[in-house]
Amino acid sequence: MTEAPEASLLTPYARSLGVAFDRWEGTTPILRAEYADRLSGRPGALHGGAISGLLETAGYATLRAALGDEAEAASLKPINITVQFLRAGNLQTSFSSGRIVKLGRRTANISVEAWQNNREKPIAAAIMNVMIVQPDAA
């Protein structure tokens, strides 16, 4: 990727949720979402949509980081995304990162987790299947 790859990891939707690049762990981006009132769901908990958005963004960021320079030209299209809510998200900063399970020429399978205080106690997890569409070589 180019000199500031973190900038290409986030969509306008992700930014509207307050998702930001936190740090790299090796070649894997770790994203964070600071708590804001607009992310509240039921009293005292984060909205499931905000958690899902964080997971989805981290999955795509992980895939873009793995594709490197190819990510600039590729279109990433969701095949399916399955989210499992494991515990309530508290009204605090959340983090997320993904792991490529399988990266093929046309599809990728990604596992993603979101956590708050303790990475060993995730608040949600997702499995993503993504189609990778490269521009025509002609």
Image (cartoon, grey):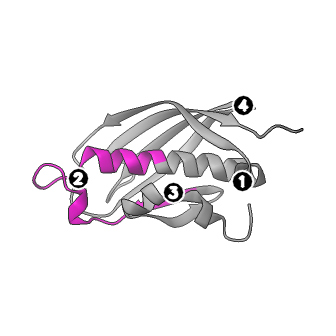
Which sits earlier in the primary sequence, circle 3 or circle 2?
3
Nearer to us of marks 4 and 3 is 3
Local SS, label 3:
loop
Please identify the residue farthest to the left as the structure is shown. Answer: 43
Determine crowd level at label 4: few under 14, some 14-19, many 20+ residues with C-alpha closer than 10 A. Answer: few
Image point (44%, 53%), residue name: 96
Which sits earlier in the primary sequence, circle 1 or circle 2?
2
Determine crowd level at label 3: few under 14, some 14-19, many 20+ residues with C-alpha closer than 10 A. Answer: few
Residue bounds of the magenta highlight: 29-56
Residue picked out by circle 4? 104
Amino acid at the residue labelled 4: Gly
With 90 as the anchor, is 96 left or right in this view?
right
Please tell me whether residue 36 is drawn above or below residue 119 in the rendered image: below
Nearer to us of marks 1 and 4 is 1
Q: How far apart are marks 3 and 1 (CA)?
A: 13 Å
Numbered mark located on residue 72 in the image: 1
Q: Quadrant of the C terminus?
A: top right
Which sits earlier in the primary sequence, circle 3 or circle 1?
3
Numbered mark located on residue 46 in the image: 2
Please tell me whether residue 130 is drawn above or below residue 31 in the rendered image: above
Residue placed most toward the observer, 101 or 54: 54
Residue 2: quarter of image: bottom right
